[in-house]
Amino acid sequence: MGALKFPPTYEATDAYGINLTSNNAAWTARLGYTQSKITYKQGALELELPKNTYRDTTLQYNDGIWFVMAEATILDFDEGFRTRDANAVTLGHYFGQFLPYLARVHRYTTEKNNSSAIEVLGVGDPTVEEANKNITIGMRTGLTSKVALTVEIAHYFDFEKVNGVRSNGVFNGDTVGSSVDIYTINLDAVF
């Protein structure tokens, strides 16, 4: 029998943020900023991670026929982890209550940050540059006025400069040239 393993948990504290949204007919623009401290816990191990900042900019067009969204995000840590950027573009077309869509995402690290914090978590060297891309095909539909169902297939690929352990905190064990498919079913409810 192997050792008992506890799943990791993350706890955010000292969290605050702001979200500015502007609407004009079918257009929506958003700017977001969030800052928090994260505590990583697994079994008896408890580790205070560096303060992180998440910034995003989104421009969306939704006229009830076409859905188009472009988003750029930055996840930055005070120390110990590399800054991670992501850019995404989504295009969808409504057929009644059904919205099939296609999304393209590129995630990558930008700044080097020398610290052993990431090594304690067993996810490799924080100074290695990493990147991956994905293409997602999905379908969203409203089941009721307050419940929506989304089904997605995401193909992650083009793992660049991966350190052999982890790429952008998404998958363990992936190497350059590998790809991963993820199938997701989400049920969203508003109360």
Image: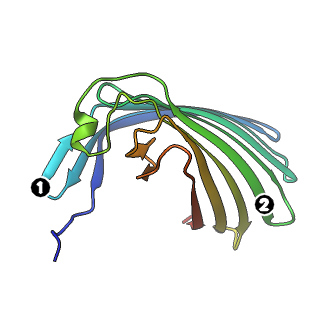
Instruction: State whether residue 58 is above or below residue 62.
Output: above
Amino acid beneath label 2 = Pro
72 to the left or right of 60: left
- Report which quarter residue 78 is drawn in: top left
Kindly identify which residue carries mark 2.
100
Q: Which residue carries the number 1 mark?
A: 44
Res. 32 visible in picture = no
User: Disc 2 or 1, which lies upstream in sequence?
Assistant: 1
Judged left or right of residue 98, residue 114 is left
Asked whether the beta carbons under mark 2 and mark 1 sit within 8 Å of each other, the answer is: no
Question: Quadrant of the rendered structure where residue 90 is?
Answer: top right
- The residue carrying pointer 1 sits among few (fewer than 14), some (14 to 19) or many (20 or more) residues within 10 Å by Cα, namely few
- At x 17%, y 72%, the residue is 2
Image coords of residue 67 (percent x, y): 79, 48
Q: Is residue 3 left or right of residue 123?
A: left
123 vs 190, nearest the viewer: 123
Three-letter code, disc 1 = Ala
